[in-house]
Structure formats: C-alpha cells, structure tokens
Amino acid sequence: MSGRPGQFGRLLTAVFLACAPIGAQAAEIRVPAEPGALTQALEQAQDGDVVRLSPGRHQGPVRIEKALTLDGGGAAHIEGDGSGSVVTVAVPGVSVAGLTISGSGSSADDRDAGVMLLKQATGAKVTGNRLVGNLIGVDIHGARDAMVSGNVIEGRRDHRMNSRGNGVYVWNAPGSKVIGNDIRWGRDGIFVNTSKRNEFRGNRFRDLRFAVHYMYANDSVVADNVSIGNHLGFAVMFSRNVTIAGNLSSGDRDYGIMLNYANDSHVTGNRIEGIGDRCVFIYNAHKNRLEGNRFEGCGIGVHFTAGSERNDITGNAFVANRTQVKYVGTRWLDWSAEGRGNYWSDHATFDLDGDGIADSVYRPNDSMDRVLWSQPSARLLLGSPAVQLIRWSHATFPALLPGGVVDRHPLMQPVEPELKAWGAPS
C-alpha cells in the first residue's frame, strides 16, 4: 500500500496531460473516486480548467484556490469529515456544479457549510447541486455577485430548529442572487444580514423557521417564491427599498409577511393564505405600499401597530379572515389611495352606479374589538344586549368611534394575483 500514492499521482498526471490541448492554457482534468484524488487534482489545476469528478464518493473537505469549474456531472459526491466546510472557495470566478455535498461540521461560530464562498470568491456560481445534511447549505460570506441557483438544499434535523443552520446565508455580499432553489429543514431558508442589491427569486421553502429572513438589507428583490408550512414566510426587518412581489405563503404558522422597521418598500401581487395567526404584521414600518395582494383565510388579515405611518394600502383583497384588521389607535387611517380602496369579503354593500366602488365606507373594527383584544374573557358577553347596543351605535353613528381603519372607497370585486408556478422559468 505504501507505493499507492506515487502510482496514483503518475496516473492523475497522465490523465491531465492527455486531456490538455496543445498550446492551450485550459484543460479538463478527470478525477477518479479515489482517496486524495480530488485534493491533488485541485492542487495541479490551473485557472480556467474544468475538474470533472467521476461518479462515486470523493474525499473532502477541499479548498479551491484557482478560478476553475468543479463539475460532478450529477453523479459525484463530495463527503466531508464532519468538521469545517466541505468545499471552500477562496478566489473569483469559480463554478461548483452537479455535485452532492455533505458532511460539514456543526460549529455555528465557524459557519460550517456545504459550500463556503469567502470574500475573495467574487462572481462564484453554485448551481445544480444537492447539499444534504450540512449545518449551512451555502454561505455567501462577503462574495460579491455570487449566484446560487437550481440547488436542492436539505438542512439538519438533529438539533432544535433555532440551533440549526440556514439553507443560504448571505452576509455583506452585494449583488448576490439566490434563484430557483428547493430549500427544506434547517433554520431559515435564506438569511440575509448587512447586504444590498440582492435578488431572491423562484425558490421553494418548506419546514423551516423563516422562509426568507431579511435584516439590514436594502435595495433588493424577493419575488416569485413559495413558502409552505414554515413558522413564518417572508420577514423584512430593518431594511428599505425592498420589493416583495408575486410570492405565495400557504399554511405558514405565524405570519405570511412581516414588515418590522421596513421602510420605502413595495409589497405587490402576493398571495397569503391559510396562516394560523396573521397574514401580514406591520410593526413600526413607514412609507410602504401594499397593493394587489390577496390575504385569505388567516386568523388576522393585517395587524397594524407601533406607530406605522404613511403607508398606502390599496387594491388588496381581504377574504374570509377571522379578523380582517387589528389596529389599536385613536387616529383615523384611510386605507384607500387615489379613490381606490380594498375588497372586504364581509362588507355587505351595493354599487348602484356600477363603477366598481362600494357605495358605503368600510370600518373593520369598533371599540368592542379593542376590548376583546385586551380582555379576551370579554367574549363571554358578546351576545349580551349591552354589547349589541354598542355595536349598533357605532355602525349607525360612526362619529362615536374613537379612531381606527376606514376604507372610504372599498372595491366590489377581489383581486386574484397571477403567481408563477414554482419551477417555471423566471
């Protein structure tokens, strides 16, 4: 066995020379599924080379320090030794494709990942891989203009959810794109921190804490994604100028969309349905526009709180939510813009002039709602004559109301956002 490494080295060199075109700088290196073969191939490779892995299991972890393509052809598996990241990219222009990658470490402090893109890995591409059972699927750690697309990422399930890693972690990586991935288990599908000009489009998220968790990330797009059965769909926090468009949140537990200290953003054409708690939670968020969304079958359609101001909420459909709006405040908020409000499934009204706008205004809450929110036990009195008298007086004499949401131009027909089927070309 002592002579094996030398024999293997001569074999790998022969394969390298046979595949290298005369007078060309780039070459194709074919790597057998042998212990140590991949590490040696990466050491011998030059910028521009294509390193093709034979079907089978290859030994990791490995570090890429040449601008090359690492291609598994859909049948090669790089398996780490349970410590650190399995594949680390430390130079620009690297492509990692067609691989199964598993066996990272479990250190959250070290951000152990299936694929780690360091700051130097500008323009890296991680495409068409299966990343299974790693703490973090792909860590874009400072790498500008990275692309993570078409991967299947299945996270850990042997820790408490909050102790697991994220499917894709983006930190200080402007211009990164995460497109068309299928992400399941782990903690958050995509967690973004301190980044900008990112695009997250056409991904599917299942069995996670948050589908997309956005913090201190400006001027970005979250579009055409699907969130199914997570604790929370799309959380945008401490960010500005974010477009949240054409997403589906179905059957998530707590919230479909959360805007927390999110400003100057556009939430449009989303469908949020069957959420156990709130379709949308807006907390201390200002100058946002919610338009053309459908909020259906949730415990609360929109919970609006903490002094959120100058938001336009128009052209949306609120359908069969147990409570359409929860707002506690003494100010009147008009949820219509430019003569167009929202559709409310519980608004019994007429449209005598046929202009598509209801002839009467809509007020989703009265003072009894505020009592019930603060004192749930008061529900025992809902059928009492006193409560019915209060509600009748508010409906008959709206001036008695202390403030709240009013839609002065409610729509007669609901909107139906046209969502792209998951997996369709973006």
Image: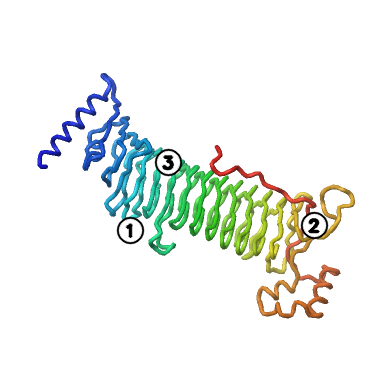
Nearer-the-camera pick, 354 or 259 = 354
- Residue 185 spot, x, y in % from top left: 45, 56
- Could you say whether the residue bearing mark 3 is in a helix, strand or loop? loop
- 34 displayed left or right of 186: left
User: Which of the two labelled residues, at mark 3 and mark 1, occupies the earlier sequence position?
Assistant: 1
Residue drawn where x is 36% and y is 35% of the image: 73
User: Which of the two labelled residues, at mark 1 and mark 2, occupies the earlier sequence position?
Assistant: 1
Give the residue at mark 3: 146
Give the residue at mark 2: 408
Q: How far apart are marks 3 and 2 (CA)?
A: 47 Å
Numbered circles on residues, count:
3
Q: How far apart are marks 3 and 1 (CA)?
A: 23 Å
- Residue 59 spot, x, y in % from top left: 26, 45
Give the residue at mark 1: 107
What's the residue type where badge 1 is placed?
Answer: Ser
- Residue 248 spot, x, y in % from top left: 59, 50
What's the residue type where badge 2 is placed?
Answer: Arg
